[in-house]
Image (cartoon, helix red, strand yellow):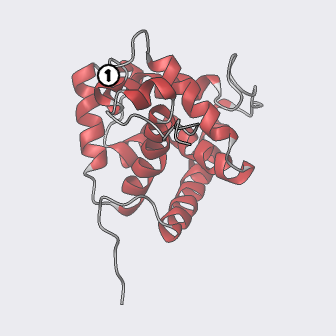
Amino acid sequence: MNQQPPSGHGVDRRGFLKLSAWGGAALAVGAGATTLLTGCSSDPGPASGYKHLRDKDVTLLRPLMAPLLGGGLDAVEGAGPDQALQAFDRLLQGGTDGQRGQLFQLLDLLQLGAARWWITGTWTHFEEQSDAQLRETLSQWANNDGGFPKLAFKGLTQPIMMAWYVTPEAALTTGYPGPPVTGSSGAA
């Protein structure tokens, strides 16, 4: 009996393993083709001001922050895509090298036009899309019934949203007052 979790749930263990397998295979094919076309280059490491996200990851993800987080960035005074990316980078600190490696494989796939088209439905790089096009891309990607694209969407967007809404400033915008404050109640 093969039961699928309701669409509102996150990525389960089986889905995560499928995401890893599909991503690894697609990355191997894409990386092989890219290497042949561009030659090998070493990874320069994290972008300036980040512990894990690379320059190409920041460039790829920055345009997605506002449409992905809805009004979440606007609700926090002075917040923007870079603050959301910093929160995501801090969340990555808590992961294992293997988990981060799988995320970076997905981000590398999204750099390749053909893979981006297969996963998200668009060839166009995110930074070249208008706000309306980005919202449409995210909507199509989120509603894709394909196994790997749906897993990739959840595997990328859920941690980004979680990272943003656990920041104290953003958490307050949700209407949740925070955990109870412990202390003396004045009762004797």
**Residue shown at the point (78%, 31%) measured from the top left:** 42
SS type, badge 1: loop
| Of the pair 78 and 63, the residue shown nearer to us | 78
| Of the pair 39 and 101, the residue shown nearer to us | 101
| Of the pair 134 and 119, the residue shown nearer to us | 134
Q: Residue furthest top?
A: 78
Local crowd size for mark 1, using a 10 Å CA cut-off: few (<14), some (14–19), many (≥20):
some
Q: Where residue 118 sits: x, y (%)?
A: 38, 48
Identify which amino acid the numbered label 1 is placed on. Gln
- In the picture, measured across the screen, residue 169 lies left or right of residue 49, that is left
Tally of numbered tags:
1
- In the picture, measured across the screen, residue 33 lies left or right of residue 71, that is right
**Residue shown at the point (50%, 43%) measured from the top left:** 159
Q: Quadrant of the N terminus?
A: bottom left
| Of the pair 167 and 141, the residue shown nearer to us | 167
Q: Is residue 60 visible?
A: no
**Residue shown at the point (51%, 36%) measured from the top left:** 163
Quadrant in the picture for residue 128: top left
Q: Residue furthest front?
A: 188
- In the picture, measured across the screen, residue 35 lies left or right of residue 130, that is right
Q: Quadrant of the C terminus?
A: top right
Q: Where residue 104 sits: x, y (%)?
A: 61, 42
Q: Is residue 172 above or below residue 101?
A: above
**Residue shown at the point (48%, 50%) measured from the top left:** 155
Q: Kindly identify which residue carries mark 1.
A: 129
Q: Where residue 23 sits: x, y (%)?
A: 54, 55
Q: Is residue 29 visible?
A: yes
- In the picture, measured across the screen, residue 95 lies left or right of residue 160, that is right
